[in-house]
Amino acid sequence: MQVLKGMLVAVACAGSTLVMAADDADLDALLNVGGGAEAAGSGIKLGGYADFGAAYTLPDPGHWSKLRARMELAASGQLGGGMKWKVSGRVEADGAPDLERGHYSGAVRRDQRADASLREAYLDVPAGDWEFRLGRQHVVWGEMVGFFFADVVSARDLREFLLPEFEALRIPQWAARAEYFGGETHFELLWVPVASYDRIGKPGTDFYPYPFIPSGTHVSEKTPAHDLRNGNWGLRASRLIAGWDLSAFYYDSLNVEPTLYRTSFAPTYELRHDRIRQTGGTFSKDMGQFVLKGELVHTRGRKFNTQDLAAPFGLKSSDTFDYAVGLDIPYDSVWRFNVQYFERVYYDHAPGLPVDRNERGASLQIVREIGNDFEVELLAASSLNRQDYMLRPKLTWKFAPEWRAVMGVDHFEGRSTGLFGRFDDSDRAYVEVRRWF
């Protein structure tokens, strides 16, 4: 009954917002900051979005895990000589941690209560076949459905695992990027002097990646000093060959994903960012009835948590090889299917690691458009080594050109050390309403 009540309240919150959107022209006027057009007489283009999301976690004890309002604003324009610029920022506030203060620790409440961030702030400078982008920017090297493989540059906000849209989940990097465009060849040089890193939240939050650490436990993070020795750099080349879109890259970086060090047998823990070196590539080809695509990455320098108590810092080093192969299949103009197979190989696998030497998985995405306004989607992902899976059905309603409502369920199943099963107690129902301007 408590779960049903929570879901009904969530739907009611969304419903009241939809009614307001449909009937209140004043709200449209309030949010219509330029409507994506140029501000009068300035040559500056303004845009962005505002949204509200509510999520109710279903397993006992049921609780609100998200009641978040967010707004993102962007401005862009042109300068002389073909130069362009863009600045965007985001502010958000979440009422769930304080409403459920009996469930969330003080550290979780402070981490998730409110946030303000600079998203992008860059300048584009053209120079013949070259283009230079300087500043805070997104650098996207891979785009598989639902997971990160070749997208090695992006930092991520993982406080909701991989559930949000990737454009909202990615954290930009302060970088200098030089790109060469010559016919069917594209070459890219990248330097990240001051890196951003993944945000994983605090122990006790719903999607903390180390569920064996009790809520309220202090876990410090050793953030690398902001000097040139801790910078990241990489290069990437791509070319279209006989219809195949091929790319290869090398990236030397401090890992955006923190490694959990056990610093004493008390135990106490510290998050650190070790230097890793990654070599990989991507491929895609339109085969007519479907698109074939894939990504692969070899990583050196990474460490993994082990159950071997004799292991220094509770870690075991191992090189890894990740790859994913997928098919995008459109059908009858209203159906879209995506099928993916992926695998990680641990070259230095040893007893105590809570994973197999070869960790295999697969995912299936089915999207069905219903008329012009509705879209039904199911995303299912599972380990092929054991029972460990995620199911994500959702319904999208595009009830006006600038408005969208989404409602769905995120369900996890598996053992506590599994990629998905560690969130077995975080199943949730959610609604989201967004307005673009």
Image (cartoon, rainbow, N blue to C red):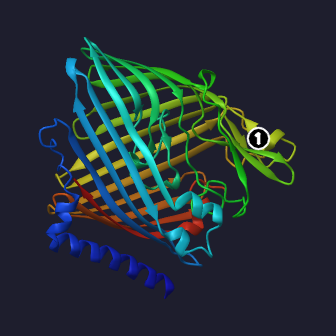
Q: Which of these two is toward me, 239 or 199?
A: 199
Q: What residue is at 37 percent from the left and 45 percent from the top? A: 89
Residue 414 visible in the current orientation: no
Q: For residue 260, what is the image quadrant?
A: top right
Q: How many marks?
A: 1
Above or below residue 358? Residue 107 is below
The residue where tag 1 is placed is 315
Q: Position of residue 269 (x, y in %)?
A: 76, 49
- For badge 1, the amino acid type reads Leu
Q: Position of residue 162 (x, y in %)?
A: 48, 52
Left or right: 218 in relation to 120: right
Q: Position of residue 315 (x, y in %)?
A: 76, 41
Left or right: 301 in relation to 43: right
Label 1 neighbourhood size at 10 Å, few (<14), some (14-19), many (20+)? Answer: many
Above or below residue 126? Residue 210 is below
Furthest-bottom residue in view? 1
